Image (tube, rainbow, N blue to C red):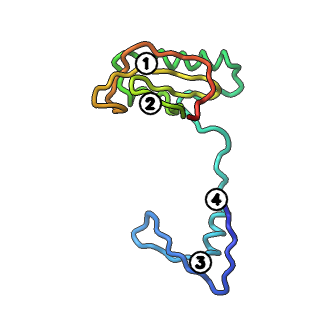
Amino acid sequence: MLRTVLVSAPLLVLVSGCSTSPKTRTVAEIVVARAKRPAPPKGPPASAASSQGNLDHEQRMQQVRELVSRIKVGMKRSEVEAIFRHKDGGIQHTSLTLYYEDPEVMVEVPFESTGGDWSRENRVNGSVRVYRSLPHLD
């Protein structure tokens, strides 16, 4: 987002970053630098299963089912989340987690509570369910 700032004298801004010494730059220099940046990509974020292109829903469901077939009982939550990165935005239960894969594909994975609720060490303890659903925004 670009904001216009009116000042009568050059306004110096302390810019800190990865370098060892901070730099001072004028607001005009910052505005010019930001204008030169490439625009961020548009569209949904990429996930492990988002190579959907122009697939119809049944093809998309089949693609997600193929990913689900890699999930085995005893697999850690961290391993599952390497496959499905987008948790559903609705209410989550400690015994299962819902993952949303665009468009309209929900993946329900049951976990036991080794290491405590929501631990990356939780392990899959049952069948994974795939069904059609819009994301929940509870």
| Circle 2 residue | 81
The Cα atoms of the two marked residues, 2 and 1, are separated by 10 Å
| Circle 1 residue | 71
Amino acid type, label 4: Arg
The Cα atoms of the two marked residues, 4 and 2, are separated by 32 Å
Q: Which dot, 4 or 2, sits closer to the camera?
A: 2
| Side (left or right) of 28 relative to 72 | right
Amino acid type, label 1: Ile
N-terminal label among 2 and 1: 1
The Cα atoms of the two marked residues, 3 and 2, are separated by 43 Å
How busy is the neighbourhood of tag 3: few (under 14 within 10 Å), some, or many (20 plus)? few
N-terminal label among 3 and 2: 3
Marker disc for residue 37: 4
Q: Position of residue 121 (x, y in %)?
A: 31, 29
- Residue 112 picture quarter: top left
How busy is the neighbourhood of tag 1: few (under 14 within 10 Å), some, or many (20 plus)? some
Which residue occupies the foreground of this view, 102 or 23? 102
Q: Residue at x 71, y 25 (%)?
A: 54
Residue sticking out furthest to the top = 127
Mark 2 falls on what kind of element?
helix
Q: Position of residue 6 (x, y in %)?
A: 69, 78
Q: Is residue 74 above or below residue 31?
A: above
Q: Are marks 3 and 4 in contact (CB under 8 Å)?
A: no
N-terminal label among 4 and 2: 4
The Cα atoms of the two marked residues, 3 and 4, are separated by 17 Å
Q: Which dot, 3 or 4, sits closer to the camera?
A: 3
Amino acid type, label 3: Thr
N-terminal label among 3 and 1: 3
Q: Is residue 100 above or below residue 5?
A: above
